[in-house]
Amino acid sequence: MALTKYPHVYQPIQVGNMTLKNRIQYSPIVTNHADYESGRVTHEMLEFVSGQGKTGASLVTIGSTPVNFEEARDFYGCLSATNDHDVPGLTMLANELHKYDCKLSAELIHGGQWGAMTLPEGRRAWVPSIVAPYHEPAHRFQEITRTQMLTVIDDFVAALKRCMAAKFDMAMIHYAHGNLMSGFLSTLWNQRGDKYGGSEQNRWRFPLELLEAAYGTVKGRMPLEMRVVGNEYLPGGTTLEERIRFMKEAQRYIDMIVVSAGNLEYGEAFSYNMPNYYIPAGVNVPYAAAFKEACPDLVVSVVGGISTLEHAEEVIKSGKADIVAMAKALMADGDFVNKGARGLEADIKPCLRCMYCLREFGPHLNSCAVNPSLGWEYRGFSTPLPALKKKKVMIIGGGPGGMAAATYLTERGHEITLYEQGDKLGGRLPEAGALSFKDGFRRYAEYAVRKTKESGAKIVLGKKADAAAVRAESPDTLIIAVGAEPIRLDIKGIDGPNVKDVSVVDRKETETGSQVVVCGAGLSGTECALALAMEGRDVTLVDTLTEDQFYSDMRHFSRPTLTRLLAENNVKLMPECAVQEFTNDGVTVRKADGGEVKIPCDTAVIAFGLKPDKGMIDELNEIVPETYVIGDAIKAGVMGDAIGSAFWATREI
């Protein structure tokens, strides 16, 4: 502790009868590592949870643990605490975390309306009331009966008993994100006509009954945490003031709350549930502060885009929350909290807040953009394997993929020479982090360049590694990480002085006029358009795609925020328009009906995407028998694709 710059983060705290060693909680996430059919603990899940404990966090809360495996699930692959046969597996999880002086909790949940995603045809999800248009088709939902409410209470009580039997240190009652209990509290979801709906006291009745039963089950034996939202981000949702009034009633049953926001579906509410880099870091801190002021005796934890120790220290020092809950930052660096405690915060691998971790939410959590081993702990990928035979490896390209390959291979003991034809490392990383809202990318660029320089690899700058250079180097293994170059279409006037490449504009290496047309509505073009509009420019975004296809490479739960920001900043969208000509005072486009229109502008920005130089790559690929092509040199993608392909290739060397 003496080495740390963050005394408030590393100060222990008492939660009920439990002491946490620091103020970082591993926020509940669903990893899909449990058995799909039964929810039992698997070897894969045990290894993943062990990795969570190894981060140095004081508390891990396992996400989405249904209290009834038939009715209450909201995800596949979630953990079960619904059967006495689950207890041995749950005990293994607790024992594993206790090795690292880490406490374990389970997020107990009844999915309610989200059960419609997992229930077979013919079964109906229990909801406080059926609310159109959210609960459609209506035959997939059922207004829960009083008898079923009592069953839910019994299920929670039974799950709590199993958690205690398994030596869990705490349990969370999930009252957020649109699930069954959250629904009862909500003015939107609860439109019942009986004594469990209507007034706020009526809407609180069932949730308080459940809390009373839970408290009676664990009193004096295990503390309880509760997940709540500060804002549902849905029209007609409950106000923060009412939620605070509810918490004043509920606080006698619980020891700690975790303040979140949003829902699992329904437009931008989903974005606020898992905030990306468009949403300000710490977006939920004001809500946490309001709960803390109203209920000073409750321990308050806050989640929502806080991804640095500096920010966590600021929040806790201010008194706005007692604990900071993180997930993505701890996924990016599996030693995050330990490094901060040891004075090694400069070595923490930054989280991009890019949501790459959720791009393929299938069999299990499938890696992180900057930490490709995430999710694969059970295969031993978190620890670099020493090379069986030391090899001389030549890497061509000093972008994110090439730098990652260099650091992975030097860790394993290989001899590395990295060639970068530019005068500095980074490749397209500087443009990736150029926009104001992508601060995680900027931090990662600094980190990656520094770690590559420190790795021990020989770095050759300012020299293009052509076929002759490869032959002269005579490596055992060659890695081609040359990236991709901007696509320049054969359009009249494209070489005009007012036509600029998106990367140059993003990095502020050129002047940009007050009226701008951005040509290309992929993610890079769209984000460029947004950034320019946020600076006060008049921006039009043009593409041959339909509007629904604009920035389609953005995950569906992040798209609503980007769409809102474009509208708020008055970016004009012109779908199904093909650029015909660039002139000194505008861009001429052909619309879907064949008509042409000229869009006035001072500056035109081209963002037609990237493509690899196939001829050069094919030539290099024929020299060394053991050759790997990685990153954009295979196919233009995002940073996580480049780093991931470097990781998988280097494991084979």
Image: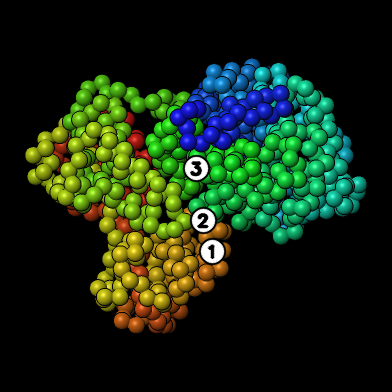
- Indicate the quadrant containing the C terminus: top left, top right, bottom left or bottom right: top left
Left or right of residue 479: residue 546: right
Q: Could you say where residue 82 lies in the image, as x and y percent from the top left?
A: 71, 26
N-terminal-most mark, 3 or 1: 3
Crowdedness of circle 2 by 10 Å Cα count: few (<14), some, many (20+)? some
Q: Quadrant of residue 46?
A: top right
Residue 554 drawn above or below residue 396? below
| Amino acid tagged 3 | Glu
Q: Name the residue under label 3.
A: 310
Crowdedness of circle 3 by 10 Å Cα count: few (<14), some, many (20+)? some
Q: Residue at x 33, y 71 (%)?
A: 511
Q: Verify CB contact (< 8 Å) between mark 2 and mark 1.
A: yes
Q: Mark 1 points at which residue?
A: 565
Q: Verify CB contact (< 8 Å) between mark 2 and mark 3.
A: no
Q: Nearer the viewer, residue 68 or 443?
A: 443
Q: Nearer the viewer, residue 135 or 352?
A: 352
Q: Quadrant of residue 472?
A: top left
